Amino acid sequence: MINFEEELKNFKPSLEVEEAEAAIYNHDLTDVTDIITELIRDMKPGNPF
Amino acid sequence: MICYRCNHEAGNEKTCPICGADLGIFHKIIRLSNMCYNEGLQKAEVRNLSGAIISLKKSLKFNKYNIDARNLLGLIYYEMGETVDALSEWVISKSYQQDNNVAGRYLDELRQNRAQLDSINQTIKKYNQALLYCHQDSRDLAIIQLKKVLSLNPKLVRGHQLLALLYLQEDKLEMAKKTLRNAGKIDANNTTTLRYLKEVNAKIREKGSQKKKKEDDLLTYQSGNEMIIMPNRFQDSSLGSTLIYLVIGLLVGASVIGFLIVPGVKTNAKKEMNDKLVAANETITNNAQQITMLENQVKDLEEELGTLQGQSEALPEQTASYEALLSGYVAYVGNDIITAGMNLEDVDATQLSDSAKSLYETIWAEISEGYYEQLYSSGYSSYGAGNYTDAIDKLLRVVEYDPDYKDGNATYYLAQSYNRNADMDSARQYYQYIVDNYPGTEKAMTARNYLNEE
């Protein structure tokens, strides 16, 4: 049974064109390679990289 | 690829040619990213846009520099009506790769078509307004607004889904089904769409079973933009009932024809017959009148013909009389009394005109006495000369004029001429006349003797 109110919560307002710039800037562009690079850096503290 | 350690271009080498860093794992990540991209591409090809988005996001999570995946993701967003998300992906893609990037073309096309961009912006605003109406429980306004949005941007899957949700809430199941189908055409395996569709179908089935229990027994279905509601009982049309309906229909039709149409036709036919009869009678009457008139004309013509025929028959006699008169007149002028008298004897005074008759009478009065005198003399001379035929001719004229002419001598010599001409039969009557009228005379004795000799 579909609950109207619950389902309505899933619908978020769309970004307007003027808000596109902000959305792009706030876009999380971290990918796995960034994570692994971070991990490698963290794994070797004495590593100059 | 870029080396994580020294940030130099390492190409496809497993170790960085500059710093020697092990790049094997990064190559694996890139391969995973590409695998996810392929998966997303396959899903996009079969219109499973939601699934494609998940795969492509995964691909970009592995490798944000996967330009193809990002461009495709933007394209999918654009197809689903999420234009701003599409723009974002393309801008990011362009920033990662300036040259030889199809995202640049997409952005240029959008930038050049300003009107389209404004229209897209309007639809986004209206959609957000519709969403606000939903939160404010103004579902009717939300539906109206969403219809406008979808008319401007028919590929906005979220719009279709929200509208379907509203229809579901309003219990307009068929319309919800229709709009979900439209959403399904854009994004085939969208989870939300499928969930809503499942709910709609379940409700329809539930209502269908409930409707069967009702006495109304109505059947509702969507035909295009129209909602068709009809009594279900009309669906029950087995062959037997169809035949019965046919028979009933035929009987009703026959009754209608027999009671309504046939009398009318008969009446019309009778009226027509009567009219024709009247017309025929009129014709007969007219014809009879004409016949009578023609008969009268014929009668008149026959009378006239008879008159004319009489006249024509009398013409020869009339002509003969005139000719005789003329001949007689010529003879009279020539002092030929006998010829004039003979001609005038042939004249029928009744045939003559008044003037001709007057002439005839004048001449006759003048010559008649002398004519018979000369005629007797000539006849007697002919008798004496033995020319009995001529004597008979002349003496007969005299006798016819006056049997007692010259004391019966004309009659006596006429008888004698007949006798001498071997025509005793003709002589007898004249002999008898002499015997009867002049008894005791010599000619009477002679006549008796001739009579007794028979």
Image (cartoon, rainbow, N blue to C red):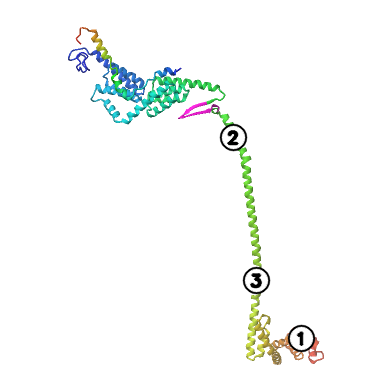
Labels 2, 3: one chain: yes
Q: Where does the N terminus of chain B fall, quadrant-wise?
A: top left
Judging by the rendered image, the residue that carries numbered circle 2 is: B249
- Magenta: main secondary structure: strand
Q: Helix, strand or loop at disc 1? A: helix
Residue toward you, B228 or A10: A10
Magenta stretch holds residue B41? no
- Write the start and end of the magenta stretch as one range: B219-233
> Helix or strand or loop: what does disc 3 sit on?
helix
What amino acid is found at the position of numbered circle 1 in the picture?
Answer: Tyr
Q: Do labels 1 and 2 share a chain?
A: yes
Q: Which element type, helix, strand or loop, lies under badge 2?
A: helix
Identity of the residue drawn at 45% across and 22% down: B168
Image coordinates for residue A17, horizontal then vertical, percent: 32, 25
Point out which mark residue B304 bears: 3
- Residue A40 higher or lower than B247, as above or below: above
Task: Say if A13 sits above or below B426 in the image.
Answer: above
**N-term mark: 1 or 2:** 2
Question: Which image quarter: residue B320?
Answer: bottom right
Q: Mark 1 points at which residue?
A: B430
Q: In this view, does B74 lie above or below B430?
A: above
Amino acid carrying mark 2 in the image: Gly
Q: How crowded is mark 2: few (under 14 residues within 10 Å), some or many (20 or more)?
A: few
- Quick one: label 1, few (<14), some, or many (20+) residues within 10 Å? many
Q: In this view, does A46 lie to the left or right of A15?
A: left
